[in-house]
Image (cartoon, rainbow, N blue to C red):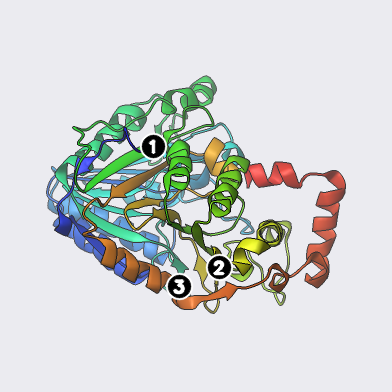
């Protein structure tokens, strides 16, 4: 696939690297204020909190100043209409959208995309903030922790790409395959008269989204960027791209993932890569840097077992590949920084091919969610130094794993965690849970 994959030609100075969530927020606000023609934002959610309200207020101000500005925001339909997990009485982010947008003289479009009929079956995990001819690509959603509004932050990757063809391709795909679909609905409708999508339209949306693709004039030479979208197990170009990056890498891989739960086909490809004597660096979040980690001093709930499940998956992989760790071929770096969380995704192969994406390397992302990514092919190695600097920044708060025994076992976990995980094992439900969570 890599040999046949064309891309959009990209000048050396077309990319900027943002290294912090605060820098992302500042860039978003600047781009919103300066946009002249169109703003198209795609994220899992736009939260009803301080940072989310600030972004929404900036969008409304831009629309008021330039009514001709086309502003479209896409979020997951189900995620927008429920409250936060563990927060009873929270009615959902769409209530904020209704209140803010419906009171404005010049409204904007905030659309909910029901990728599947239920949230646990699949969500809109599409990424990309598009402003005129500029694309900001990140796995981040829009809320306090992703934009470092308070004391804590959720670490991600942030790239700014100046490319009119890329922006047009990404915007066109959204308009053609998502915005125009009958299952996609406005989240700013009046509560008394709102019309929700027909159930049959929602059920069949996944079939239509599976056909989504980016259109552009392609070149197969020089430095270029290729947008890729995927949904489902069959004919998923993004999944195939990841496997091909691993299979065709000649020297080394640098992989970022929030937790370690790879699909079997990817786990097998990584093992084969190591057996051929090639190097892999994996930067994975410590269990305490997981979105769902609950500190021992706080009230525990079932969802808090998830980081421990992922940690045991990493321990199993490390134990199986201990020979590669001993040989210096496999380097596992655990990221941990105070009470902050880790959300980085992506793969770099041989310092020449770089996949930036919001897609997790797990069975859920590979089968259930609508995902996308950008492949940067650096034939001239013009971006080698910048990616190296980004990797050094990522590794700043990591600890290298030298032996699988450094990872805790079930016996070391809090009593409440042990109880849940033993119950899951007895029911043999861990296989199913890893596919949907």
Query: Label for residue 316?
Result: none
Q: Nearer the viewer, residue 218 or 411?
A: 218
Residue 174 position within the rendered picture, expressed as x and y whole percent measured from the top left: 31, 35
| Label 2 crowd (10 A; few <14 / some 14-19 / many >=20) | some
Residue at 31%, 35% in the rendered image: 5
Residue 214 position within the rendered picture, expressed as x and y whole percent measured from the top left: 30, 33
- Image side of residue 350 versus residue 422, left or right: left
Residue at 29%, 41% in the rendered image: 226
Query: Label for residue 328?
Result: 2
Instruction: Name the quadrant of the N terminus.
Output: top left
Q: Which residue is mark 1?
A: 229
Work out which residue is located at the far right of the displayed protein and give it: 426
Q: Nearer the viewer, residue 161 or 128?
A: 161
- Seen in the picture, residue 266 relative to 234 is either above or below; the reply is below
Counting residues from the N terminus, which is met first, the one under dot 1 or under dot 2? 1
> Can see residue 190?
no
Cα separation, mark 3 vs mark 2, equals: 17 Å
Pair 1/3: label in front: 3
| Residue 173 lies in quadrant | top left
Residue 234 position within the rendered picture, expressed as x and y whole percent measured from the top left: 52, 27
Cα separation, mark 1 vs mark 3, equals: 28 Å
Q: Which residue is mark 3?
A: 395
Counting residues from the N terminus, which is met first, the one under dot 1 or under dot 3? 1
Q: Nearer the viewer, residue 407 or 22?
A: 407
């Amino acid at each position: 696939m890599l040999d046949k994959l064309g891309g959009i030609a990209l000048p050396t100075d077309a990319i900027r690297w943002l290294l912090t969530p605060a820098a992302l927020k500042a860039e978003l606000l600047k781009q919103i204020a300066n946009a002249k023609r169109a703003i198209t934002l795609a994220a899992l959610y736009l939260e009803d909190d301080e940072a989310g309200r600030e972004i929404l207020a900036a969008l409304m101000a831009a629309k008021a100043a330039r009514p001709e500005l086309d502003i479209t925001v896409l979020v997951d339909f189900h995620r927008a209409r429920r409250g936060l997990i563990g927060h009873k009485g929270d009615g959902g982010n769409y209530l904020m959208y209704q209140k803010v947008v419906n009171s404005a003289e010049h409204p904007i479009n905030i659309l909910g995309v029901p990728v599947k009929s239920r949230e646990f079956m699949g969500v809109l995990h599409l990424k990309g903030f598009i402003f005129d001819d500029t694309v900001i690509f990140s796995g981040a959603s829009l809320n306090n922790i992703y934009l470092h509004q308070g004391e804590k932050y959720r670490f991600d990757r942030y790239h700014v790409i100046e490319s009119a063809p890329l922006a047009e391709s990404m915007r066109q795909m959204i308009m053609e395959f998502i915005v125009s679909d009958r299952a996609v609905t406005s989240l700013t409708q009046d509560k008394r008269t709102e019309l929700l999508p027909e159930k049959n339209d929602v059920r069949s949306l996944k079939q239509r989204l599976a056909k989504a693709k980016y259109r552009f004039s392609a070149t197969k030479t020089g430095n270029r960027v290729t947008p890729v979208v995927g949904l489902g197990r069959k004919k998923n170009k993004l999944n195939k791209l990841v496997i091909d990056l691993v299979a065709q890498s000649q020297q080394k891989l640098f992989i970022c993932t929030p937790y370690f739960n790879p699909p079997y086909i990817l786990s097998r490809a990584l093992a084969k890569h190591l057996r051929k004597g090639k190097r892999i660096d994996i930067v994975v979040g410590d269990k305490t840097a997981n979105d769902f980690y609950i500190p021992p001093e706080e009230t525990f709930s079932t969802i808090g077992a998830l980081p421990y499940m992922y940690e045991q998956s990493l321990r199993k992989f490390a134990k199986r590949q201990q020979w590669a760790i001993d040989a210096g071929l496999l380097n596992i770096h655990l990221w941990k920084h105070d009470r902050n969380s880790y959300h980085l995704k992506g793969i770099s192969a041989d310092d020449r091919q770089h996949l930036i994406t919001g897609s997790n390397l797990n069975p859920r992302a590979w089968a259930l969610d609508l995902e996308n990514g950008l492949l940067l092919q650096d034939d001239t190695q013009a971006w080698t130094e910048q990616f190296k600097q980004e990797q050094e920044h990522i590794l700043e708060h990591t600890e290298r794993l030298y032996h699988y025994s450094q990872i805790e076992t079930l016996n070391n976990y809090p009593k409440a965690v042990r109880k849940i995980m033993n119950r899951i094992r007895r029911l043999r439900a861990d296989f199913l849970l890893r596919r949907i969570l």
